[in-house]
Amino acid sequence: MSHHTLRRRLVTAVSTAAALLTLTSLTAACSSSSDTAVTADGKTVLRYEGSPAQVGFPELAESLGYYEDVELEWIGDNGNGPQSLQNTATNQIEFGSAFNGAVIKAQAGGAPLTGVLASYGSDKASFTGYYVLDDSPIREARDLIGKKVGMNTLGAHHEFLTREWLAQEGLTPEEIAQVQLTVVPPVNTEQALREGQIDVGTLGSIFRETALERGGIRPLFTDESLFGSFSYGTYVFRDDFIAKNSDAVEDFVQGTARAIRWAQTTPRDEVVAEFEEIINSRGRNENTDLVGYWKSTGVAGPGGVIAEKEIQTWLDWLTRNGELDEGTFTTSEVYTNEFNPYANGTYDPNSGPNGEPVEEAVQ
């Protein structure tokens, strides 16, 4: 993305700030901490939020020694994508991660953010399923009219995917509006489904695997069934941070991309063992049960390279649903692959984490 585009988007963000009451109030509160911290040996400090008992790709990159110019500073845990975007936009953290549709909506609202590499997605091994009980009368999309679908948050991945599936199955916008989307914490989703508090439960990772072990549920659809192998989210930075700290962003992206590629090309048992070592060494009073259910990165592109379709799909979706004016953004204004070594010519896309040839990716 050009410096001209960065400047234009920063001006746009300022002009729309009056309408962003939450963002502006938080920005004012944190304005005194706008200077980027630097370690004694000259590394740029990147504040971030993690997830309990899980290892993010940036944490993996740091453990593998892939960063040269940046150092991570964990400030707490957060599993909410829209909140991660808000915290990034308001300088609470340097980078966050969220569903691409939520990233676009935040940008449209004036948040000066840019996606720099893929952060999560779905494939045949790692996916999110939308489950009903075995004896549920719900068999097709039309059966969901008037029913409750439980998910961890609204305005993010699960809402978009549910509404997309309903649309692909032929429901009208008016019919889709009658499907009740309900917030249920992931840890409570299975119980809420089995007790009849919701009709469909969104289950992924350990929550899906343990629920399937107990039996009595079946998938209505999965996100992988909609788009196949597909990256759904990106890591984002503020545009002003990119402009002022491009070397740090480049180092973060190359290191994190290599960590993703390491996980894509390394046997699963070795990846899980590395995750367990990271969790045990970081002193956050966690156990390693969750990472034992890890199966794959879910990231479609080598080293997290973002495919244009992974952005254009949601630009089209938001436009089609009247949430975004036609032509508000081009894909190049939403994300950039310029820092990713697997996209900018540094490494062959089929190579390993150090640019070495690999016969076939494990993941």
Image (cartoon, grey):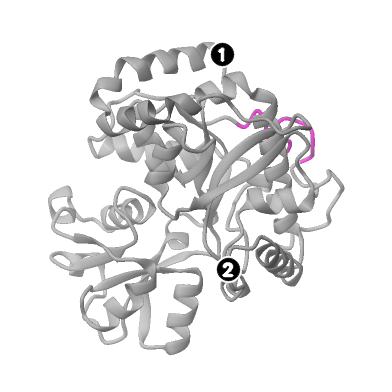
Q: Left or right: 291 with respect to 60? A: left
Please provide percent x and percent y for residue 31: 43, 25
Tell me, yes or no, if residue 313 can be seen here: no
Q: How far separated are the C-alphas under marks 2 and 1?
A: 43 Å
Q: Left or right: 39 with respect to 10? A: right
Marks 2 and 1: CB-CB under 8 Å?
A: no
Q: Residue at x 24, y 25 (%)?
A: 19
Quarter of the image where one finds residue 15: top left
> Tag 1, which secondary structure?
helix
- Please name the amino acid that badge 2 sits on: Asn
Span of residues in magenta: 337-348
Please provide percent x and percent y for residue 292: 62, 75
Q: Along the polypeptide, which appears first: circle 2 or circle 1?
A: 1
Examine the structure image and report whether residue 6 is included in the region drawn in magenta. Answer: no
Q: Residue at x 17, y 48 (%)?
A: 173
Examine the structure image and report whether residue 342 is included in the region drawn in magenta. Answer: yes
* Disc ID at residue 3: 1
Please provide percent x and percent y for residue 323: 25, 35
- Residue on which the image places disc 2: 285
Q: Residues within 10 Å of mark 1 (few under 14, many from 20)?
A: few
